[in-house]
Amino acid sequence: MTFSICVHESYETPDGERHRRFGVAVTTRLPGVGTLCPFVSENCAVATQSLVNVELGRRGVAYVNDGLTVEDALEALLNADEGAPQRQLHGVDADGTFAFSGEECRDWYGHRTGDHYTVAGNLLTGESVVDAAAEAYEATAVHETIDDTSDGPRVGDGADPLAKRLIDALAAGHLEGGDKRESLPVQSAAVAVETTEDHDVTPPYNDLRVDATETPIADLRETYDLAVQGYEDTLERYAEAYEEDSLDGARAE
């Protein structure tokens, strides 16, 4: 079940501060994929799928946070996992990538790695699903760029937020056929992004899930658009209150 993408990007804000961000996006023909597969921190992004073992994601992120490379962390976890042949596990950190597809995963299954990203899937209509998702991300990937979207994605200058671009990558894979199990109409999708940049108001569009729907990508995109709108409305109404850490600066109307 599932295809997903993990990404690392680096960027600079207009004040000269350097930052990095990590993101995961995933979709499947089962409900609640966002509770099982995507894991992300300021140091890495990991996706666990096929016969899911959530500990591979949780512990993988924890190991990288403690200083291991994503390759060493995920390989160590797979080496200790008797179910490894049925697992699919991939991820990125600031310095590299890792991708594994066990030989007992169900066709079509496989993965692809590129500069700062990994894509993997199983029970897909074909390899073109993974390729389409990878190529859609590659077309919009950014590194070592100036990014000024602190006042909202529709206000500042820079690339579209990573969450939006990851949803677009899912959409490209979905258009190629995605998960082949058409007898399972209830689907789900999720996107999660973490960054080293501090915000007075945490962007809500960086952590979104659609847990049960027949149109997961369209619904996730609509949820993203509404979250962006709500974020910008919040900044307009409550920016002074957040900056002063006081409700005295909040507009009451």
Image (cartoon, grey):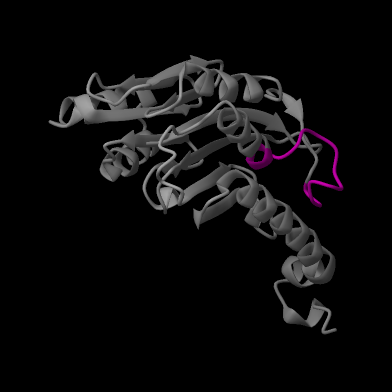
Q: In this rendering, does residue 203 appear at all?
A: no
Q: In this rendering, does residue 153 appear at all?
A: yes
Image quarter in which the N terminus is found: top left
- Is residue 162 shown in magenta? yes
110 up-or-down from 225: above or below: above
Residue 7 in percent (x, y) is at: 54, 29
Residue 195 in percent (x, y) is at: 59, 42
| Residue at the image position 27 percent from the left and 23 percent from the top | 75
| Residue at the image position 37 percent from the left and 22 percent from the top | 109
* Magenta residues (range): 150-164
With 64 as the anchor, is 157 left or right in this view?
Answer: right
Residue 179 in percent (x, y) is at: 45, 34
| Residue at the image position 67 percent from the left and 24 percent from the top | 141
* Badge count: 0
Nearer the observer, 245 or 34: 34
With 251 as the anchor, is 189 left or right in this view?
Answer: left
Residue 60 in percent (x, y) is at: 33, 36
- Is residue 187 shown in magenta? no
User: Dominant secondary structure of the magenta stretch?
Assistant: loop
Residue at the far front in the pictured view:
183
With 71 as the anchor, is 175 left or right in this view?
Answer: right
